[in-house]
Image: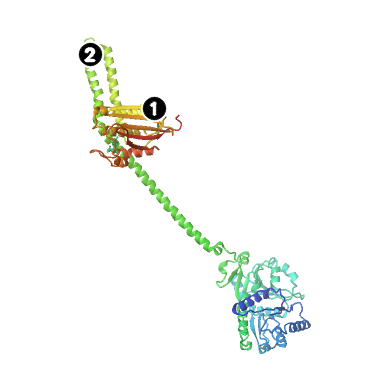
Amino acid sequence: MLFNEGRDAPGSITLQQVVQAELQKLSTNRIEFFSEHLYARHFSDKANFQLFQDYLGKKYAGQNLDLFLVFPSGDYSLAGALPDALFPDVPVVFLSVNELAVPSAISKLGVTGIIQRFDVRGTLGLMLRLQPDTRRVVVIGGTSEVDRAALGRIEESAHALEGIEFEFWTNRPVAALPAAVQSLPAGTVILLSTFQRDVTGQPFFMSQLAQMLVPSASVPVYVLGGWVLGSGVVGGVVVDSEELGARGGQLAFRVLGGVKPETLPIEVVTKGTPMVDWRALRRWHIRESRVPADCLVRYRPVSLWDEHQDLILISLVVFLAQAFTIAGLLAQRKRRRQAEAEINRQRTELAHVSRVSTMGQLASALAHELNQPLGAILRNAEAAELFLQKAKPDLEEIRAILADIRKDDQRAGSVIERMRSLLKRRDLASNPLDLGELIEETVALAWSDALTRQVDLTMQVSARLPVVQGDRVHLQQVLLNLILNGMDAMATCNPADRRLVIRAEPRKDGLVEVAVSDSGTGIPPDKLERLFQPFFTTKPEGMGMGLAISHTIIAAHGGSIWGGNQDPHGAVFKFTLPAERSSP
Ligand code: ADP
């Protein structure tokens, strides 16, 4: 590989890499590359060229070279005369980027190659598309033969553009340029042409110049070579080193494969690749919508989406799945709450129905209990009338009778009051309760029934009973239910053996335990499990709801209820309630 430029010429670094990579990709053989650089910008005299030629001739004499890959950048003798003089049988493929005419002699020497022209017209077109307000183009170019050829092409194209003024800055030393571009007015753009050498003879690379000018330039800079992109210039329809390198590699591969170079015509490419720097678009507020669809936009920051597309999609799916699950769970919770509320309502309803039916069982006994005070009131009233008929009524006596009437009335009133409170439909409340008092009230309700049924009803309530938290009416319902069940179970016993005991005592674990035991038939062992199931009953007129409801009431209080048999006969039902915290 022969390079006219130095090793560090920005234009040929990529070109070399791509050509080598392309060749290696295409070939199954191992290819060895040697690269030699003439550094023509610095060593331009004939003597140096001769020195280079002699050196190559001696160095590669025994190497059996298969191909010269030449990057002549304007000096076609590097692709023609030099290899022809040294190894005339070795084929030559060259890649050149410039505007010079191809010397006709070269194609006769077993040489082929690609000459890439700058797409000046394309670049000017892109410039006007991105910045339609452009009125003036400042062209900055060098003074070498190659530079002048490029400027000539730009001048040609400039003629075709009416209404736009072109200004050629070719006779200014590079040192003066940064200051000169600082205050260019709006509506101006800079077009950077090739710049091998300035007016003082100093050698430069286009990309070096771009780096010097762009930071201070008051207007956007356009270029013709793709390798200049990245230095802050906007871009252009540029020579794409990658594309040119790949095509050069393919051409070289064909020649290495045996195709005679002279049968392959030298190709002249005039079309460039539209390419812009995204950061420069931002800097000059050029809308991206103006960028043509086929234009490559370089240096656009990689978005999170570009970089982690898979991850984002997976996260999105997971997120959506999660959102749906949460929504589903929320809906489910709402339905459950509704169902719970409905169950609560039905339970209250059922408890009420059950209470009413329990009261029905007590009705005759209660009527009897009411009859007593009412009868006494009647008798006392009659007695009072008799006293009043006397000439001198004994007022003391009448006063005592009235006091009796008042007492009997209060007795009857309290019976009715107890019944009424049990018959009311109500939700579960939670108040501090004296369990002893509650048991006494309940026993009072069942008392007359017990008398009728000849049941010996006794209470054993511990004096140290702590206060419990709960609903008076509902707990009374539970107790009453247990008492009536016990009395039912003793219906067939000898009246002398009908004993029902209600015990209440604190337990060591902080709970209060209430037990209702009877001396009745007991519960058949196979029925024990089903006692608390709804509608389980062994009684002809039973509903089978009493224990089931008692179970829900006690559970709602945070306690438990269970039942079993006791020695020697009879059943015992127990329930616990948590004591109120503050109570001893
Ligand atoms: P019901 O009294 O309407 O039958 P319960 O739920 O109160 O409904 O009682 C269910 C069943 O449990 C009764 O039918 C009875 O068979 C049994 N049972 C309840 N208490 C006792 C008890 N103290 N002795 C024997 N069996 C009982």
Which mark is drawn over residue 387? 2
Q: Is residue 240 visible?
A: no
Is 36 positioned to the left or the right of 247 in the image? right
For the point 46% across and 57% down, the residue is 321
Front position in the image: 389 or 71: 71
Is residue 199 rendered to the left or right of residue 465?
right
- Residue at numbered disc 1: 462
Amino acid at the residue labelled 2:
Phe
Residue 305 image position (x, y, % from top left): 54, 63
* Residue furthest right in the image: 47
Q: Which one is earlier in the sequence, the residue at label 2 or at label 1?
A: 2
| Mark 1 nearby-residue class (10 Å; few <14, some 14–19, many ≥20) | few
Q: Quadrant of residue 409?
A: top left
From the viewer's perspective, tell me whether residue 430 is left or right of residue 413. right
**Residue 364, above or below 530:** above
Q: Position of residue 333 (x, y in %)?
A: 41, 48
C-beta proximity under 8 Å, tags 2 and 1: no
- The answer to whether mark 2 is within 8 Å of ligand 1 is no
Is residue 536 positioned above or below 300 on the image? above
Vertical position of residue 118 compared to residue 188: above or below = below
Q: Which mark is residue 225?
A: none
Crowdedness of circle 2 by 10 Å Cα count: few (<14), some, many (20+)? some
Cα–Cα span, label 2 and label 1 = 48 Å
Secondary structure of the residue carrying numbered label 2: helix
